[in-house]
Image: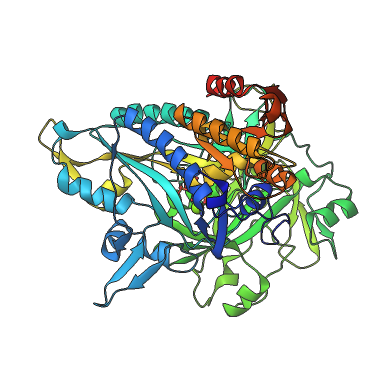
């Protein structure tokens, strides 16, 4: 390929729309162009990167025995009604684009394919003899993300590899899950990115196990907690730990304390001379449930801890049997719009009366109360008195006993690990590039996808699902591999492996030697690019650095001596060599 024919438009300035380095470099390097919010054109250079990643993914998926397929992107709403996900995915903060066709039928644009594939499996697979089956596809997914950002990292239209497996029993599912785990490790390694596998939340209903693959990067949206010995890693949603110790309050008696203007834990601790871990923080939330109920929640947690909403959602599912669509904190305005009397915000205790909910417009009229273990284990503490400007010293007995106790806090950096209390958790950030998940029978049950087992009984499939964000992975590779000059692609996924730069196009000798080297490279099977533009050498070097081709062969003044300069992009190491030696060196490395 010739740079003169590549439609290459590079930018010197950092585009205003791009916050993180990989996004900036992909735009500046002429890889992607924004079409509208969260929607990007993959330009020819980018397409080559995506194709190389795709080829690696296909090889590894094929090796697991998974069959490639291609499913429709338009999904009839009926399938999503049957799984019970239509409402959650289309109403409120739902992320499914949806439309009505000319016949008045509702359709959704596929954000994921459990419904479509489970229904197909139910129709096509009747007997345990046909199992296990695993299918995968690589296609564009649509998600109307609430906050599309960072270019291809969180876009509204992106390329995903998604695979689904069907099994007659759980052990068989586990075995395929392990195969996928290995395949994923190979894929990321072969793509030249460093990804770590972390435990992830598998929801309250779903399956037994779930792992995410994270490319570690400071710009990552996910927080990962891992142990110092590397034996444990989980994302924040899932991570567990031993909480830091607390110390009981010194105060002798139970009493009311006047605490005007001490409505936050910080102010209260400062004024009362106590520690945050001696206070019970009470959080007031409203949960939207799948059955459209709005359930007020009162959560008690130790003052130095943070609530984990995923763990809370799971607890709520166990309690109510309903999936949680959303959880948000209750604000003063919400109380007013529910037509309720004012709440003592800043001074709420775990025993806040249900009376306050009487007559609510749309909310359920009793609180569901949860206590985190850290709060439950305090013998004596300070908490709100349910009247403005007063807290009290109390214990659980005085409050009428312990509400339901669970683990619903975030683990945090510095906490001791469960597997070995001498190990501490450390926090890093990551970009989720893949996810493997033992779904269990959630979808096969709701969509009535059954097969006949060895005993002749009809039962739902055991299922797994396995995703990789192909376009996100391409950008994550840039986040991990770049320097001050531009991208440094790992060679396996670089759009081209080598670029021949003719320094002076007016010099016939340089031009001829450049062309000769280019032909030789192609003959030897190297993915080569030649910069044959009538531009200054400096411009060409800058562009070559920016677009990040792993090897650069500069044909300049030394052409007279029959020599070229071979530059390794990642280390900037330079060597003057004969064309043959230079080409051999590249071939060796490929
Ligand atoms: P996230 O938590 O980042 O939103 P997710 O849990 O919704 O991801 P999955 O439904 O498991 O993601 O999708 C599989 C993979 O697709 C993810 O691991 C990720 O790499 C990729 N992906 C998900 N959403 C997007 C998006 N909006 N843009 C680009 N890639 C995405
Ligand atoms: Mg998502």
Query: What's the image's color scheme?
Result: rainbow
The residue lying furthest to the front in this view is 508
Tell me where residue 457 appears, x and y as whole percent: 12, 38
Task: Give the residue displayed 45% in from the left and 45% down from the top.
Answer: 203
| Residue 373 locus on image (x, y percent) | 62, 41
Residue 577 in which image quadrant: top right
**Front residue of this view, candidates 424 and 488:** 488
Say if residue 175 shows up in the picture: yes
Q: Classify 421 as above or below 145.
A: above
User: Tag count in the figure?
Assistant: 0
Looking at the picture, how far across and down is residue 184, in whole percent?
45, 32
User: Residue furthest toward the left?
Assistant: 456
Judged left or right of residue 255, residue 204 is left
Q: Nearer the viewer, residue 137 or 81?
A: 137
Residue 239 in view, yes or no = no
Residue drawn at (58%, 53%), measured in percent from left and top?
8
Q: Considering depth in this image, is 496 or 539 the residue closer to the camera?
A: 539
Please give left or right for residue 190 compared with residue 279 in the image. left
Query: What's the residue at 67%, 34% (across, down)?
Result: 554
* Residue shown at 68% from the left, 30% from the top: 559
Picture coordinates of residue 525 (x, y %)? 45, 29
Name the image quarter holding residue 170: top left
Q: In the rendered view, would you say 470 is above or below 9?
A: above
Looking at the image, residue 372 sits to the left or right of residue 379; the answer is: left
* In the foreground, 171 or 299: 171
């Amino acid at each position: 390929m010739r740079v003169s024919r590549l439609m290459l438009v590079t930018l010197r300035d950092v585009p205003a729309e791009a916050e993180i380095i990989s996004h900036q470099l992909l735009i500046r390097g002429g890889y992607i162009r924004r079409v509208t919010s969260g929607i990007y054109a993959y330009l020819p250079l980018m397409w080559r990167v995506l194709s190389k990643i795709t080829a690696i993914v296909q090889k590894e998926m094929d090796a697991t025995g998974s069959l490639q397929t291609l499913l429709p992107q338009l999904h009839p709403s009926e399938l999503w009604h049957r799984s019970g996900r239509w409402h959650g995915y289309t109403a409120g903060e739902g992320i499914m684009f949806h439309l009505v066709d000319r016949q008045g039928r509702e359709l959704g644009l596929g954000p994921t394919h459990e419904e479509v594939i489970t229904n197909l499996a139910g129709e096509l697979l009747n007997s345990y003899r046909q199992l296990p089956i695993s299918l995968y596809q690589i296609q564009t997914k649509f998600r109307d993300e609430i906050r599309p950002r960072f270019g291809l990292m969180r876009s509204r239209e992106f390329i995903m590899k998604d695979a689904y497996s069907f099994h007659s029993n759980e052990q068989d599912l586990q075995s395929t899950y392990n195969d996928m785990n290995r395949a994923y490790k190979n894929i990321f390694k072969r793509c030249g990115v460093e990804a770590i596998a972390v435990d992830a939340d598998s929801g309250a209903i779903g399956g037994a196990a779930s792992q995410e693959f994270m490319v570690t990067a400071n710009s990552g949206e996910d927080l990962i907690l891992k142990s110092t010995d590397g034996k444990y890693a989980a994302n924040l949603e899932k991570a567990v730990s031993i909480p830091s110790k607390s110390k009981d309050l010194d105060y002798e008696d139970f009493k009311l304390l006047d605490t005007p203007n001490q409505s936050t834990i910080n102010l209260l601790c400062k004024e009362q001379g106590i520690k945050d871990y001696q206070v019970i923080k009470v959080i007031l939330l409203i949960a939207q449930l799948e059955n459209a109920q709005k359930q007020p929640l009162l959560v008690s947690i130790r003052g130095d801890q943070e609530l984990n909403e995923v763990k809370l959602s799971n607890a709520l599912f166990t309690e109510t049997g309903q999936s949680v669509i959303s959880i948000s904190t209750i604000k003063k305005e919400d109380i007013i719009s529910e037509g309720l009397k004012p709440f003592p915000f800043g001074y709420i205790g775990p025993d806040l009366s249900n009376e306050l909910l009487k007559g609510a417009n749309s909310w359920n009229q009793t609180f569901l109360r949860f206590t985190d273990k850290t709060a439950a284990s305090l013998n004596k503490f300070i908490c709100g008195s349910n009247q403005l400007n007063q807290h009290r010293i109390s214990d659980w007995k005085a409050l009428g006993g312990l509400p339901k106790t669970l683990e619903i806090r975030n683990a945090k950096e510095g906490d001791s690990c469960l597997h070995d209390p001498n190990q501490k958790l450390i926090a890093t950030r990551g970009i989720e590039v893949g996810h493997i998940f033992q779904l269990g029978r959630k979808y096969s049950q709701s969509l009535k996808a059954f097969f006949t087992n060895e005993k002749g009984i009809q039962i739902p499939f055991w299922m797994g699902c396995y995703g990789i964000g192909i376009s996100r992975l391409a950008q994550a590779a840039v986040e991990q591999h770049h320097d001050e000059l531009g991208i440094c692609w790992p060679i396996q996924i670089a759009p081209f492996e080598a670029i021949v730069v003719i320094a002076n196009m007016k010099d016939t000798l340089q031009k001829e030697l450049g062309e000769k080297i280019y032909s030789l490279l192609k003959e030897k099977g190297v993915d080569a690019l030649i910069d044959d533009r009538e531009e200054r050498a400096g411009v060409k070097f800058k562009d070559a650095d920016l677009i990040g081709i792993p090897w650069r062969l500069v044909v300049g003044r030394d052409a007279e001596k029959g020599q070229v300069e071979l530059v390794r992009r990642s280390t900037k190491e330079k060597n003057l060599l004969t064309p043959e030696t230079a080409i051999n060196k590249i071939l060796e490395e490929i």
